Image (cartoon, grey):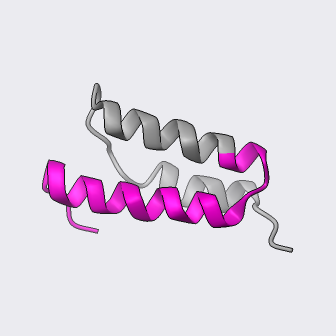
Amino acid sequence: MTHITNADTNANTNSTTRPTGCPVCQELDQEEAAARTEWDASKVTDCRVLRARHLAAEHGEQP
């Protein structure tokens, strides 16, 4: 069983400046938050990967 700590959740959450108002970014943030409350580490990771891909493709940010 994988446990998610505050350090894990803050590691990527605060390190990237996300564009405000992007509905895809907002949806991924909400999905990640829900996954954290459900202690679903796999889904948290999935959301982070999808967000990184989205940021690179749509907002020109590099991982």
Q: x and y percent of residue 57 in the render?
A: 17, 58
Q: Does residue 4 lie above or below 2 as drawn?
A: above
Relative vertical location of residue 5 with respect to residue 2 in this rendering, above or below: above
The residue at the point 41 percent across, 33 percent down is 26
Q: Is residue 19 left or right of residue 11?
A: left
Q: Which residue is the extreme one toward the bottom?
A: 1
Residue 30, image x, y percentages: 54, 36
Number of marks in the image? 0
Q: Residue furthest left?
A: 60
Q: Quadrant of residue 19?
A: top left
Q: Is residue 13 above or below residue 27?
A: below
Q: In which quadrant will I find the C terminus? A: bottom left
Tell me which residue sits at (49%, 40%) in the image. Answer: 29
Residue 53, picture quadrant? bottom left
Tell me which residue sits at (63%, 54%) in the image: 9
Instruction: Give the magenta-colored segment's residue range.
Output: 35-63
Q: Is residue 58 left or right of residue 46?
A: left
Location of the N terminus by quadrant is bottom right
| Magenta stretch holds residue 34 | no
Q: Residue furthest right?
A: 1
As drawn, the residue found furthest toward the top would be 21
Q: Is residue 34 left or right of residue 27?
A: right
**Residue positioned 44% across, 36% down in the render:** 27
Residue 58 in the magenta stretch? The answer is yes
What type of secondary structure mainly makes up the magenta span? helix
Give the x, y percent position of residue 48. Answer: 47, 59
Q: Would you place residue 61 above or below residue 17 in this image?
A: below
